[in-house]
Amino acid sequence: MKRRQAVSTMAVILGGSMVGSQLFLTGCKQTEKKANITDFSPEEIALLDEIGETIIPTTNTPGAKAAQIGAFMKIMVTDCYDEAAQKVFVDGISSLKEASNKKFGKGFMELEPGQRKELLVELDKEQREYQKNKKPEEPNHYFKMMKDLTLQGYFTSEIGATQALRYEAVPGRYEGCMPYQKGDKAWAT
């Protein structure tokens, strides 16, 4: 390589790094964040916690609220659902609030536990009928999404896996036939 060619190559490399660094520094400025339909408010997360608690209540083991199921639902809907499913879920929160006001004249958060259960049983019947008659390309019913996320979030949480299910952190060898007594907890591992 001749001296002139080496100097030219070095100029390109250094010039590229100077332009690249400036682009890197100015190109990484945080832009204004647009409001997203999945930007759940703390009140909505609390509502989802209460819905989850109604589905899996506290008994001799902690319920879904202790597993922070509302925050789990927010993450799953935001990160894993496509835009159509996100819209169904978010609109479903409003639909649930409307159903509560229509049936009892007050919001879900103000209902007694028995009233909450009654409302969710009705919504469960509604979603079963919808799911039975829907076309494959249509989205799931919002209450099915809420119920599925509650079950998934609870039984994969530390509380659900270790207190509602039997858990052995490092299981030994595989035993296909374990003794089971009626009322025993299922295995998480």
Image: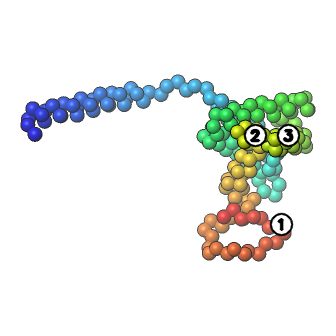
Which mark's residue is nearer the viewer, 3 or 1?
3
Q: Secondary structure at mark 2?
A: loop
Q: Residue 133: image x %, image y %?
A: 81, 41
Q: CA distance from mark 1 to mark 2?
A: 39 Å
Mark 3 or 1, nearer chain start: 3
Q: Residue 157: image x %, image y %?
A: 67, 53
Q: CA distance from mark 3 to mark 1?
A: 31 Å
Residue depicted at x 8% and y 35%: 3
Q: Which residue is mark 2?
A: 135
Q: CA distance from mark 2 to mark 3?
A: 16 Å
Mark 2 or 3, nearer chain start: 3
Local packing at callout 3 (Cα closer than 10 Å; few below 14, some 14-19, many 20+) is some
Local packing at callout 2 (Cα closer than 10 Å; few below 14, some 14-19, many 20+) is few
Q: Which residue is mark 3?
A: 126
**Quadrant of the rendered structure where residue 71 is?**
top right
* Observer able to see residue 45: no
Circle 2: residue type: Lys
**Quadrant of the rendered structure where residue 142 is?**
top right
* Observer able to see residue 138: yes
Is 143 left or right of 157, judged from the image as shown?
A: right
Residue depicted at x 65% and y 29%: 37
Local packing at callout 1 (Cα closer than 10 Å; few below 14, some 14-19, many 20+) is few
Q: Secondary structure at mark 3?
A: helix
Is 17 left or right of 94, judged from the image as shown?
A: left
Residue depicted at x 52% and y 24%: 32
Circle 1: residue type: Gly
Task: Indicate whether 59 appears above or below 73.
Answer: below
